[in-house]
Image (tube, rainbow, N blue to C red):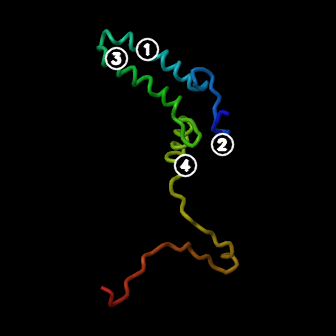
């Protein structure tokens, strides 16, 4: 009898289309190849094989990252969007402030207390 491992979370299983790759990976790798290989063939005569290879790798790397990188079940573009939103688009510091809703009934409104460092007592050097 054959023994087959079954993962605990079946939602993490992705459908493979061809060559044991998902549809997203096939599209990204195809786009990278469509841009990178002609770039290499056109530039190797002018800048040399090594430089053309490095240029091809630099151009193809973003597509490879889009295809393969995944963090917490999110693809790269969603991870980058979340980082951008958390660091630059949303306020970083949200101070804790309260409003005394009973101040109008007390007759005078008290200002919000500010944190002040305690003063040293006399005799404490």
How far is disc 2 from disc 1 in space, using C-alphas?
39 Å
Q: Is residue 88 left or right of residue 23?
A: left
Q: Nearer the viewer, residue 122 or 49?
A: 49
Q: Residues within 10 Å of mark 2 (few under 14, many from 20)?
A: few
Q: Residues within 10 Å of mark 3 (few under 14, many from 20)?
A: many
Q: Residues within 10 Å of mark 4 (few under 14, many from 20)?
A: few
How far is disc 4 from disc 1 in space, using C-alphas?
41 Å
How far is disc 4 from disc 3 in space, using C-alphas?
41 Å
* Residue bearing the label numbered 3: 52
Q: Nearer the viewer, residue 113 or 117?
A: 117
- Of marks 2 and 4, the one in the foreground: 2
Counting from the top left corner in percent of width and height, residue 33 is at 48, 17
* Residue bearing the label numbered 1: 37
Q: Is residue 5 left or right of residue 87?
A: right
Tag 3 secondary structure: helix
Q: What residue is shown at x 44% (from left), y 17% (from top)?
A: 36
* Residue bearing the label numbered 2: 9
Tag 4 secondary structure: loop
Quadrant of the frame with the N terminus: top right
Q: Quadrant of residue 4?
A: top right
In the figure, 42 relative to 12: above or below? above
- Of marks 4 and 3, the one in the foreground: 3
Tag 2 secondary structure: loop
* Residue bearing the label numbered 4: 90
Q: Earlier in the sequence, mark 2 or mark 1?
A: 2
């Amino acid at each position: 009898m054959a023994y087959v491992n079954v993962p605990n979370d079946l939602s993490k299983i992705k459908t493979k289309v061809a060559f044991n790759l998902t549809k997203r990976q096939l599209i990204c790798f195809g786009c990278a190849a469509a841009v990178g290989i002609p770039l290499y063939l056109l530039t190797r005569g002018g800048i040399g094989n090594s430089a053309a290879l490095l240029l091809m790798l630099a151009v193809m790397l973003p597509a490879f990252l889009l295809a393969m990188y995944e963090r917490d079940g999110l693809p790269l573009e969603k991870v980058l969007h979340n980082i951008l939103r958390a660091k630059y688009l949303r306020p970083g510091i949200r101070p804790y402030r309260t409003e005394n809703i009973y101040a109008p009934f007390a007759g005078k409104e008290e200002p919000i207390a500010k944190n002040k460092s305690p003063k040293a007592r006399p005799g404490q050097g």
